[in-house]
Amino acid sequence: MNNLANKTSIKNNKHEINKKDKIKILFRRHGMALVLLAMVVLMTVLSPAFLTTRNLMNVVRQISVIAIIGFGVTMVIITTGIDLSSGSVLALAGVIATSFAHPNQYPLIVSIIVGLLVGAIAGSINGAFTAFGEIPAFIPTLGMMIAARGFALIFSDGRPITNLSESFEFIGGGYFLGVPFPIYVMLLTAVISHILLKHTKFGRYIYAIGGNAQAAVVSGINVRKYLVLVYTYAGLLSGLAGIVLASRLSAGQPTAGVSYELDAIASAVIGGTSLSGGVGTIPGTIIGALIMGVLNNGLDLLQVSAYWQQVLKGAIIVGAVLLDKKKNR
Amino acid sequence: MGNPKKLISILLTVLFSVTLLAGCTGKPANSGQAGGDQNKDGKKKTIGVLMADFSDQFQVYVMDGMKEAASKLQNIDVVYMDAKYDPQKQMSQAENLIAQKVDAIVLFVVDREAGKSMIEEINKAGIPIIAVNRKLPDESKGVAYVGSDDINAGEIQAEQMAKLLNGKGNIAVLDGTYGHEPQIRRGQGYENILKKYPDMKIVVKNTGDWYRDKAMKLVENWIQSKIKIDGILANNDEMALGAIKALEDAGLLGKVVVSGIDATPEALEYVKAGKENYTVFQDAKGQGRKSIEVAARVVNGEKVDKEYIIPFELVTKDKVEEYAKRYK
């Protein structure tokens, strides 16, 4: 594994990325993958219902919405930012998109574009305040978290928006080749996000900004522009998640996605994204989301009492990350 | 470099605030301010209504009932106040009503604990309190309570489940957020009934926090765990609809009896379509109507009971239309 790490770091040297960080990322990624593997093995032993195709697809579908948000959040956190608005933006995009998704009204693409657009606009506002207002991202995204929820309630008059077209309901509820459609959406989003992050100027700049914003400015990167773009992308993905969730629930709900931002942030961080910036990967976030998903699913399969589930979830999340950290020292 | 940056941040701030303000004006204009200027001398009397939050759908229906009853009153004005779920705000609204010397206060209290000193002040001013929906922390401080009992809702729901399952089967419970009063009392109602049916057992339960998506995930996992489930009792309709989504996806819809509480318009659609087996209706309008009627009797010096319990009602497929009408 050491060899592999070295090779990767040499290869990326020309990308002006800190060698040490690079090695750390790789170690972390594999560390949490091992934790995930251990959990899967443990669950397989404990519950015969766990390792079945049907249940595994169930788990992946359950994490798809959080993971989609998580990819954007990962990028935001790499820039040393944070996005607390994902859950609320998801709800706002969901209610607005569904209001364009009634049967025989508009083509499906209209509601999708509207949903994505709402997310992107909300995200760009987050980005603009963070980049130009020069206030910590916590504040504008907290403001957006509260305001977007309010707008979702105003827009929908506090009621779920129902009576959706069949094609819209397919996005979250349908199957393609026996696999739930949200899984494809998540994978496609993951691939795009990964390419953006690893193989484009945009991605390199994101790491550079997170590694050292001052240096990024000096080296001629338009930091503000790229910050706005990152938050816009995160918002866009929240919008996409909103469409998938609304479709899955057959309703655009103004109360959807409460506290999803925390699950998304947790997925990123468990997956090795550093809250102090500059470090993080998309595969890592998928693993983080899977760890949370397997944990939720496993505790339900084992019929652990509801009160204890909360205690165990909290303990296992902290324990897993701690274990991983220790191993890296 | 400094100047354009500042300009842009100012522009953004202005833009944002303007958007916010524009949003605010879209609010319903009937946030009833107490008609303090209208002189209440002569025989004209006033009932002040302190609501917790006008934007809560349930309370909107409660007020619909109040307005219906108020329109039938003669020589009594009713004024409505919106505390926006802020106990402090409700306190100052109560003080305003006291200053205006209203003849009775109908109270939908924001927070039972935080409301104690407010209730004391109203008592001191000698104004009778009629509590609606939520009981006062100390019931002796009010002249009457109008509301429904969540235990009753749980009992109706569980009794119907027993009927549909012929008194035997495995039950899964989708609880509301643990610690919320309706969750505790509805659960108590389930227990009261299920102990009469030894062949009906709760095999699994967990909280969906009142949300559809969380309940859906739980039921998906329960299905995978291969526990045999014959019926699902959800603390509210939102969670029942989540359960239905999970069952539908697994091809189990119709093989499991599913029910909730609230009879929301959407749930009524599901009952009508035969997807949700039944729901339980909390008569918001009935509570509102009764509270004003009782307040009017108090104002006119008539005797009233200490408690008016508005019963929950079972809503089955054949009664859907009747309940759907109540939302119009």
Image (spheres, helix red, strand yellow):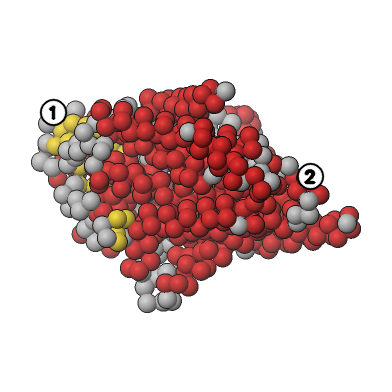
**In this picture, residue B48 sits left or right of residue A56:** right
Q: Amino acid at mark 1?
A: Pro
Q: Amino acid at mark 2?
A: Gln
Quadrant of the snapshot with the C terminus of chain B: bottom left
Query: Total label count?
Result: 2
Q: Nearer the viewer, residue A284 or B40?
A: A284
The chain that hosts pointer 1 is: B
| Residue B249 x/y as whole percent | 26, 54
Looking at the rendered image, the disc whose residue lies closer to the viewer, 2 or 1, is: 2
Q: Which residue is mark 2?
A: A214
**In this picture, residue B124 sits left or right of residue B128:** right
Q: Residue at x 36, y 31 (%)?
A: A39
Q: Nearer the viewer, residue B300 or A168?
A: A168
Estimate the spatial distance between the alpha carbons at disc 2 and disc 1, rounded to whole Å: 71 Å
**In this picture, residue A257 sits left or right of residue A103:** right
Q: Is residue A88 visible?
A: no
Which mark, residue A55? none
Which mark, residue B198? 1
